[in-house]
Image (spheres, rainbow, N blue to C red):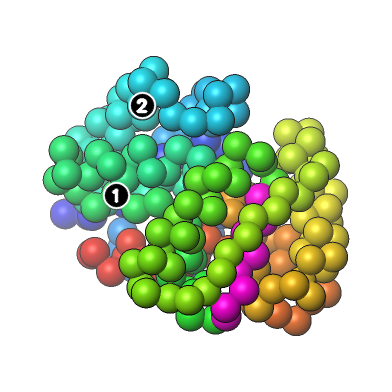
Amino acid sequence: MTKKLACLHTSAVHIKTFDDLLKKHNTDIELVHLVNEDLLEHHQKLGFVDVELQTKIELEIAKLAKDSNAILCTCSSIAQAAVDLAPKYNLPILRIDKPMAVKAISLGKRILVLAALESTLKSSLDIVKTTIKENNSDSEVIAKLCRGAWQYFEADDYKKYYQTIADCIDDLAKDADVIVLAQASMAKAKEFSKTTIPILSSPDMALQALLKYF
């Protein structure tokens, strides 16, 4: 019986990303994708997860839990609300940025978290701070917004999206030992950056972490 890994996305752009990543691993695991853009739009309006949004997230998790062996929430903004449902559904539910946060504290004392979407900043900063505390690390973390980038993502102009993020990375790299890209959609910006310090993105790290459950 084929085992299934389910992904909860807030943008369809992530489907190909994860399908391509899974092909690099010698596995017969099937990826199941569910996209609900409204979840991120709801979060953007409020900046936090309210009762209504929590209910919407649980409805989607419940759908995926019926026929999956593990679930990955690929949206950092709503990820913790999804993870908190793991005990109820007795399934591994992983937030996409957790493995990246663990890696970051092993690479340097000065961690810079970059986000293209303002509503993601707090969630991403919180997970790195929590990981630092869990590991008794003395690393320090700051978060910065790549202003102007998200408009290009919304316009499907991904080249300008990546270049705007890369310019932000290069401007701020001197003040960091490692850079964490808060959103999965930012991953390819690494290819546009000129900096030599480590730049971490979440998709492949998260997938590798989940494959350990199979």
Which comes before the other along the chain, label 1 or label 2?
Answer: 2
Q: Which quarter of the image is occupied by the N terminus?
A: bottom left
Q: Position of residue 26 (x, y in %)?
A: 37, 73
- Residue indicated by mark 2: 54
Q: CA distance from mark 1 to mark 2?
A: 15 Å
Point 64% across, 55% down: residue: 143
- Picture layout, residue 182 above or below residue 150: below
Q: Residue at x 33, y 62 (%)?
A: 210
* Relative horizontal placement of residue 199, taking residue 103 as reference (left or right): right
In this rendered view, identify the residue nearer to me: 26 or 144. Answer: 144
Q: What's drawn in magenta, residue-wise?
A: 108-115
Residue 93 in sight here: yes
Instruction: Name the residue tied to disc 1.
Output: 93
Q: Which amino acid does the dot numbered 2 rest on?
A: Gln
Q: Is residue 85 above or below residue 63?
A: below
Residue 98 colored in magenta in the image: no
Give me the residue at 81% from left, 59% from top: 168
